[in-house]
């Protein structure tokens, strides 16, 4: 009996030491044998849990998900140090569900190394040619905004859930750039795809063990099994568009991103080991489509929700817009003359906190920082939430206060603005930031020019508490858009 007990003890010790926290990793809660810290973070309460863990362990801590270390990094200074100063090593993506199962390490958002660098450079240059970050894109965005206004008018001030229309509209901007085509609001196939997409975002919770361990994805308990048919539908949709473009390709008529990519492939036919493959084209298109749709439309949903909750701010913004633009067409030149609109949007992005954990990063080699090891391949989260809710940077962070971005002369404080790191920072920083900012400004000004944004029921305002999946989303709510 003593021998059996001794064997059991040795086995438990071995399992413990093999699955425990490796020496040198940032500290963290006690690990249990085999499972480590699985179950410690409640996926739907991840933001709250990480704020609590930061109070206990400081700006760096680690959790063990089975034998895999996951490191959490808080604070603007640390995030800038690692993602900007040491950006050469901290810019890879780890092996997690989206990189392994969704993207198979191709595309823009989930690839790494030299492939990602080359593809990101091409994507940036090509999108700039199509007007990214330049004023010429705004007429395309405004066309879409005006279609959306027509949709809104159909409700004649009656309550409705704005989610589908906003999503279709924002998605159409990126579809025009990618496919040279927009979709009708009633297009059944497109509607179905956007709906499936909602499910994918709700399912892919970054704090689920199946996110860190894609091998667990087939277990129903984690819900990730729902992702497979959606990924297939998404890939089929993109493949169909690429096929159409290949059939009709005309090198003298490069109209959109897919055309530009096919032209680049043709230019590089003699290149051995080119990264410009068909798989990579499909991956890049899929990433632009997914990243460019939910993020911006979700931010706009939050903006409308805050307009409902703060009618006095809404009135101020309308007054400013009326005096600067009147009934004319909004454009990006108006932004400087409308500092209150800009600070409203900044404050919405800060409190909405739509990607509180950021996308995960990893290092391309083992690196020591502040006495801790960051092992190659470990999952690392640079928490955007830790900046956006930092009371040292934004006093009383829970309070919605756009004024915090204005200096004593009523001018926008550039220093404060730069600390709204909703798009992350460093080499992997959001590729779509210029487009997103343009969309947010043009959509918001046009809505306020045309409508009073009112709640469905003034005695019971919709909740400002979010639901956490892949993003921090608003709960479903209805509003009324009453023509001014
Ligand atoms: C309000 C809207 C948006 C927000 C808050 C946002 C935020 C982010 C964040 C936090 C990341 C991860 C950065 C990192 O890993 O450090 C990201 C990546 C990315 N975003 Fe956005 N995004 C928005 C809109 C867009 C739009 C409109 C597009 C496309 C047109 C886009 C395309 C991308 C792409 C392709 C990546 C991957 C970049 C890479 O891994 O190299 N995003 N975004």
Image (cartoon, rainbow, N blue to C red):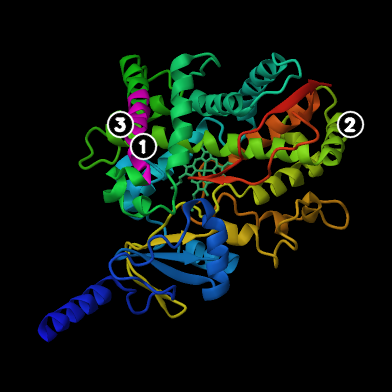
Count of numbered circles in the view: 3
Q: Nearer the viewer, residue 339 or 185?
A: 185
Question: Is residue 233 one of those drawn in magenta?
Answer: yes
Q: Is residue 188 above or below residue 425?
A: above
Q: Is residue 166 above or below residue 55?
A: above
Sequence-first disc among 2 and 3? 3
Q: Which residue is mark 1?
A: 227
Of circles 1 and 2, which is in front?
A: 1
Question: Is residue 339 one of those drawn in magenta?
Answer: no
Residue 256 percent coordinates (x, y): 45, 25
Which of the numbered marks, if any, corresponds to residue 265? 3
Give the distance between the C-alpha atoms of the residues marked 2 and 3, in whole angstroms.
Answer: 50 Å
Residue 425 figure quarter = bottom right
Residue 120 percent coordinates (x, y): 42, 44
The residue lying furthest to the front in this view is 1
Query: Do residues under tags 1 and 2 come within 8 Å of each other at their CB atoms?
Result: no
Sequence-first disc among 1 and 2? 1
Magenta part of the protein: which range?
Answer: 222-237
Residue at 51 percent across and 17 percent down: it is 183
Of circles 2 and 3, which is in front?
A: 2
Task: Decide if residue 249 is on the left or right side of residue 453.
Answer: left
Of circles 1 and 3, which is in front?
A: 1
Q: Would you call the spot at circle 3 few (<14 residues within 10 Å), some (14-19), or many (20 or more)? A: some
Residue 59 percent coordinates (x, y): 53, 71
Looking at the rendered structure, the secondary structure element under dot 3 is helix
**Res. 178 visible in picture:** no
Considering the image in quadrants, where does the C terminus appear? top right
Residue 301 percent coordinates (x, y): 65, 35
Sequence-first disc among 1 and 3? 1
Q: Which residue is mark 2?
A: 323
Looking at the rendered structure, the secondary structure element under dot 1 is helix
């Amino acid at each position: 009996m003593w021998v059996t007990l001794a064997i059991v003890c040795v086995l438990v010790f071995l399992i413990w030491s093999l699955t425990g926290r490796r020496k040198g990793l940032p500290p963290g809660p006690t690990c249990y044998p085999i499972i480590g810290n699985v179950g410690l973070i409640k996926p739907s309460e991840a933001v709250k849990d990480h704020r609590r863990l930061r109070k206990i362990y400081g700006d760096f801590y680690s959790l063990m998900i089975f034998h895999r270390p996951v490191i959490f990094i808080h604070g603007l200074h640390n995030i800038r140090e690692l993602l900007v100063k040491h950006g050469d090593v901290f810019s890879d993506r780890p092996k997690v569900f989206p990189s392994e199962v969704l993207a198979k390490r191709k595309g823009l958002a989930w690839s790494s190394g030299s492939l990602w660098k080359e593809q990101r450079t091409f994507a940036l240059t090509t999108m700039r040619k199509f007007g990214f970050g330049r004023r010429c894109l705004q007429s395309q965005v405004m066309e879409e905004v005006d279609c959306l206004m027509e949709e809104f008018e159909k409700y004649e001030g009656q309550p409705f859930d704005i989610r589908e229309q906003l999503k279709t509209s924002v998605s159409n901007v990126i579809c025009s750039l990618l496919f040279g085509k927009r979709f009708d609001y009633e297009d059944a196939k497109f509607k179905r795809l956007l709906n499936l997409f909602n499910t994918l975002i709700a399912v892919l919770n970054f704090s689920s063990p199946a996110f860190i361990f894609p091998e667990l994805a087939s277990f129903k308990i984690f819900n990730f099994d729902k992702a497979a048919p959606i990924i297939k539908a998404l890939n089929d949709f993109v493949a169909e568009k690429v096929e159409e473009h290949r059939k009709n390709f005309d090198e003298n008529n490069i109209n959109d991103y897919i055309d530009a990519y096919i032209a680049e492939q043709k230019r590089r036919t003699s290149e051995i080991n080119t990264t410009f493959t068909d798989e990579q084209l499909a991956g890049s298109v899929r990433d632009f489509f997914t990243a460019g749709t939910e993020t911006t439309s979700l931010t706009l949903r939050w903006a409308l929700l805050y307009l409902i909750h703060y009618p006095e701010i809404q009135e101020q913004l309308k007054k400013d817009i009326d005096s600067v633009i009147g009934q004319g067409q909004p454009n990006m030149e108006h932004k400087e003359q409308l500092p209150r609109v800009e600070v409203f949007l900044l404050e919405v992005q800060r409190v909405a906190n739509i990607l509180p954990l950021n996308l995960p990063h990893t290092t391309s080699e083992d690196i020591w920082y502040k006495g801790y090891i960051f092992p190659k391949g470990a999952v690392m989260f640079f928490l955007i939430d830790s900046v956006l809710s930092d009371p040292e940077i934004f006093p009383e962070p829970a309070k919605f206060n756009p004024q915090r971005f204005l200096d004593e002369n009523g001018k926008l404080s550039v220093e404060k603005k730069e600390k709204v790191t909703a798009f992350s920072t460093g080499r992997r920083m959001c590729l779509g930031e210029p487009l997103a900012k343009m969309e947010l400004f043009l959509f918001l000004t046009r809505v306020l020019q045309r409508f009073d944004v009112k709640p469905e029921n003034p005695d019971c305002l919709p909740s400002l508490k979010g639901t956490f999946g892949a993003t921090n989303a608003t709960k479903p709510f209805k509003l009324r858009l009453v023509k001014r």
